[in-house]
Amino acid sequence: MRVAVLGAGVVGVTTAWYLTKLGHEVTLIERRSGPALETSFGNAGGVCPGFAGPWAAPGMPFKAFKWLFKSQAPLKWRPRADLAQWRWLAAFVKNCTPEAFARNKARMQRMAHYSKASLVALREETGITYDNASNGVLQVFATEEEMEGGRRSARVLSELGIPHRLVDGDGVREVEPGLARAHAPLVGGLHLLEDETGDCHLFCQSLTSLLRDAGCTMHFDTVARAFVRDGDRITHVDTSAGPIPADAFVVATGPYAPQLLRPLGIDVPVYPVKGYSMTCDISEDGAAPRSSVMDEHSKVMVTRLGSRLRAAGVAELAGFDARIPEGAKRALRSRVETLFPGAANYQQAQFWCGFRPMTPDGPARLGQAGCRNLYLNVGHGSNGWTQACGTARVVAYLVSGKTPEIEV
Ligand SMILES: Cc1cc2nc3c(=O)[nH]c(=O)nc-3n(C[C@H](O)[C@H](O)[C@H](O)COP(=O)(O)OP(=O)(O)OC[C@H]3O[C@@H](n4cnc5c(N)ncnc54)[C@H](O)[C@@H]3O)c2cc1C
């Protein structure tokens, strides 16, 4: 079957990969000049099934309200005259009940663990590397209250059978010796032993090159403008390079999916949640993280990617505003320097921002929608690198008329 995949972020590229493996003739359509140049470019680099879960959680609306009045809050909301933003927020609040949280968390956990297993298998099959490492992720806590939250998470992880251990302040410094120099209090941590790290952009570049070798057709610098339908089927997608016909179409345009789907009457609840990252060369090996540290206090994640350090965080609900204010740069750099002083060339840091394609409840939207031959793979939020291989594999099975290997 001829399948067109729209969007070459990590979700589109992995979808193209699993479709090709299932024997389809795949065309990848991307408006940028190469793969993963938008949200998948500069993320924190964590493949962290242990952390996968919805942001909509009990107590979250109250926490978010308190953050509204802080200048350095991990979550910022700039109210706009934008119906999509208000509808998204209302649905988010509705999902903050214990029941909705438990249901959404279980769904995301199931997908994230399947996804990591799929990524490991893909790596073994292809031998690709992407500054990847399998040394776990350490979540660190600055206060006793945060530590208590860590104990609660550890109980959930135990129920799910996920390997982890709680450590005290000394234990934190044992796992990540670079934190011995931190100018911040660290009372303890939660070490997720099986989580991984890697550069999502490098991964997508390598996989794209394998896809090319496998015969996948690439249309870069090509904007998908609109779907053209005949009854209950899409016949082709109208693009800046002309019409592209196919037997099936997969939308993997991340935060931009609603724009493409709305004219078909498909209302997908994906809203862009902006985040920032900085990348710089490590200058003193022993002072830098060995693997990855998730700082619960600031919600900033600091990850080693080969000889580079990547730090990412902050969530802003402000539409597609791609500016990177000096204040945001200063805040990010200052928190990383507090945790890992002298570890990297912080003055030469490259800053970036991206838009997480967030659904209000957490799980991504997968599978057939609106037309018989139209499929979605969108809404991966803050876990898209973690969930990409799993969701791609599920969608490739659905497009092929096969039953996915996990319950969706
Ligand atoms: C600061 C930050 C830190 C993060 N850290 C992590 C992390 O540590 N671990 C993790 O798992 N996840 C993380 N994420 C989330 C993760 O990066 C995203 O979930 C993931 O990249 C989404 O991938 P995607 O392919 O859906 O979207 P994208 O990467 O945005 O890809 C969509 C593609 O579609 C293209 N496109 C859009 N419209 C059109 C059109 N009309 N025609 C043609 N092409 C089009 C775009 O150009 C783009 O390339 C983070 C995100 C941010 C912002």
Image: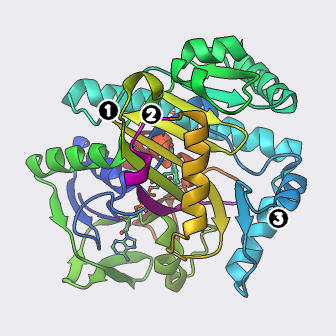
The residue at the point 66 percent across, 51 percent down is 362
Mark 3 vs mark 2, foreground winner is 2
Question: Is residue 243 in view from this perspective?
Answer: yes
Instruction: Tell me the SS state at disc 1.
Output: loop
The quadrant where ligand 1 appears is bottom left
Tag 2 residue: 343
The residue at the point 61 percent across, 39 percent down is 338
User: Tag 2 or tag 3, which sits nearer the N-term?
Assistant: 3
Tag 3 residue: 68
Image location of residue 49, percent across then percent down: 56, 32
**Amino acid type shown at disc 2:** Ala
- Marks 3 and 2, how far apart at CA: 32 Å
Image location of residue 170, percent across then percent down: 68, 12
Bin the neighbour count of mark 2 within 10 Å (Cα to Cα): few under 14, some 14-19, many 20 and up: many
Q: Nearer the viewer, residue 287 or 219?
A: 287
The residue at the point 51 percent across, 86 percent down is 263
User: Tag 2 or tag 1, which sits nearer the N-term?
Assistant: 1
**Where, by quadrant of the figure, is residue 153 drawn?**
top right
